[in-house]
Amino acid sequence: MEKGLRCSGAVPYGYLASKEDKGEWVIDEEAAVVVRRIFQMVMDGQSVNGIARTLRAEQIPIPSEHWKRIGCPVRASSYRDPYAWSATTLGYILKRPEYLGRKVLGKTICENYKTKSTRRTAPEEQFVFEGAVPAIIDEETWHNIQRLRETVRRTPKRSSSPNRLTGLLYCADCGAKLTHHNSLVQSKYIDDAFTCSRYRGIVQECTIHYVPTQKLEAAILSAIQRISWYVRNNEQEFVQRVREASSLRQEEAVNVNADMKL
């Protein structure tokens, strides 16, 4: 375990045990495409249940069926529908740190060898090996997904889905999340805007910071256009800056993990 070698036959969906070295993982390209798509669909504002319906409709094999088709050991052999994606399966995929290139061992521990009772370990009890496996998802996307998953999205009345910016905007003054709200008047939505969630807060208070959604979307579009222009005209410089930023985030992540183990 100290070297980051796996201690069981369980390899996450998206990876395969290397034929040359069973202790190493390699990317299962077919499954990795599905994993990346699931993460992107969440980033695009789709719900987990909506993603499950889409994958079922397109007859994308669930992990167990995929493993069965490529001749790998199947963990759940009792399923009836090979395309029965569920919110539970997707939630499990979306929270796995392995997709960042981390190998995490010691997730469970046996507390009683006679009864074989086990418990899930706390993060500080686990063994984390950075860069031990090839990454499928970049770090920024993975962390954005975790923030989105932690955000409770309340669907406005008579609206089909939450606003696509919900969970992504924060107050510049206090750091709290900006809350989306609107009103339905004569079959039309008005007062469509974001405000600081700590406005008139009991414990911590901030000003309203009323920002119309239309203006926010226009500002985001303008920023994307400026970045696109910069990338087209300064490609090499942009690539270098992205690499430097990525290296800095990786270094910070390593320091955090080191602090957790101390």
Image: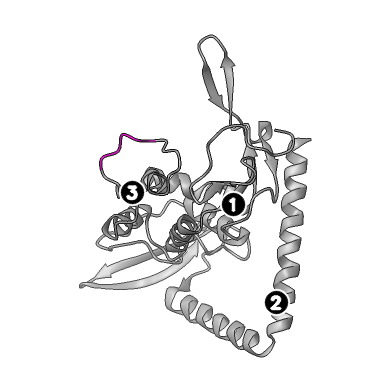
Q: Is the Cβ of the residue at disc 2 closer than 8 Å to that at disc 1? A: no
Quadrant for the N terminus in the image: top right
Classed neighbour count for the residue bearing mark 3: other residues with Cα under 10 Å, few (<14), some (14–19), many (≥20): many
Q: Position of residue 143 (x, y in %)?
A: 58, 55
For marks 3 and 2, give the CA distance. Answer: 37 Å
Dominant secondary structure of the magenta stretch?
Answer: loop
Q: Which of marks 3 and 1 is nearer the N terminus?
A: 1
Nearer to us in this view, 113 or 43: 113
- Mark 3 and mark 2 lie on one chain; the one further toward the N terminus is 3
Q: In this view, does 176 lie to the left or right of 160?
A: right
The picture places residue 203, in percent across and down from the top left corner, at: 57, 46
Label 2: few (<14), some or many (≥20) within 10 Å?
Answer: few
Q: Look at the image and give the residue range highlighted in magenta.
A: 76-80
Residue 26: mark: 1
| Mark 2 lies on residue | 239
Residue, x 54% and y 84% (percent of image)?
Answer: 222
Asked if residue 130 shows in the view, the reply is yes
- State yes or no: residue 77 in magenta: yes
Mark closer to the observer (2, 1): 1
**Residue linked to disc 3:** 85
Q: Residue 15 or 242: which is nearer the viewer?
A: 15
